[in-house]
Amino acid sequence: MISNTQSKSPMPNPIPEHAVNRFVIGVLAAAILAATSFLLYKNSDTVSTLRQPARQMDESDKLPMINKEQSTPSVELAVVEAKEKNTANIMISSETIEQLVDGVELIIHFDPNLVTNVSLKPSQIFSSVVRNTVSAETGVINLAVVRLPDETVTIGTEVTLATITYTPKQPGEITFSFAADGTVVAGNQGDDILKSTKNLTILTK
């Protein structure tokens, strides 16, 4: 009986399963990191471009609105001679029909050497009279009127804002003239909508 016995080389020790898993995970992680770095590098300009408008929009949203639509000046103030003797009316009118007005402040000069007993009586267009003064020493009339919060004042055709009464001291020319720096008409948004003023010169006898 022949016995054929073949010796086998010893089998190498197998790689532990946990080592294989760590190796595979490491390779995958390296591949993912490399791919991510490549994509970020290729798209860095695009990402920067896409993000920049968003930053600009955020900053612009914080800025106050400086281009508010302004009201067009359309109001005229004029001093005109009244029918009554030694009386003049301060008139207000607007080129815009039913122009909304919040208030009026005006300063009118006169010569105290030629006029005395000057007084001012506001009309009832505005319910609130903030200031109504006449200085006989300096020859200054100062009037400020505003609307109340619950009322609306509209100006169209010429209406009387206030009435001036006076007494001439001697024959000659009497002038009532607006001061440009102290005369304003406030529109509905607070803009100055005064377009022009007209002074009055009266020849007394």
Image: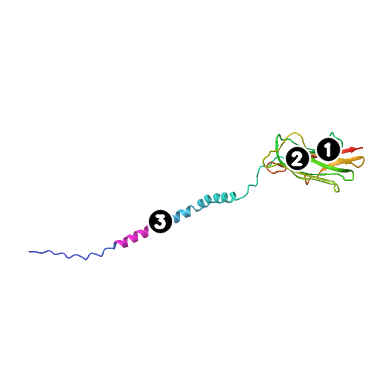
Quadrant containing the N terminus is: bottom left
Q: Left of 62 or right of it: where is 14? A: left
Q: CA distance from mark 2 to mark 1?
A: 21 Å
In which quarter of the view is residue 5 placed?
bottom left
Label 2 or label 1, whichever comes before in sequence order: 1
Label 2 or label 3, whichever comes before in sequence order: 3
Kindly identify the residue that appears in the image at 75 percent across and 40 percent down. Answer: 195
Q: Nearer the viewer, residue 48 or 203?
A: 203
Residue 121: x and y, percent? 80, 40
Q: Left of 40 or right of it: where is 118? A: right
Circle number at residue 88 = 1
Query: Relative to 63, is 195 above or below?
Result: above
Q: Which residues are magenta?
A: 17-29
Q: Left of 91 or right of it: where is 111? A: right
Please tell me whether mark 2 or mark 3 is closer to you in this view. 2
Name which residue type carries label 2.
Answer: Lys
How many numbered discs sit on the rendered protein? 3
Residue at which label 2 appears? 195
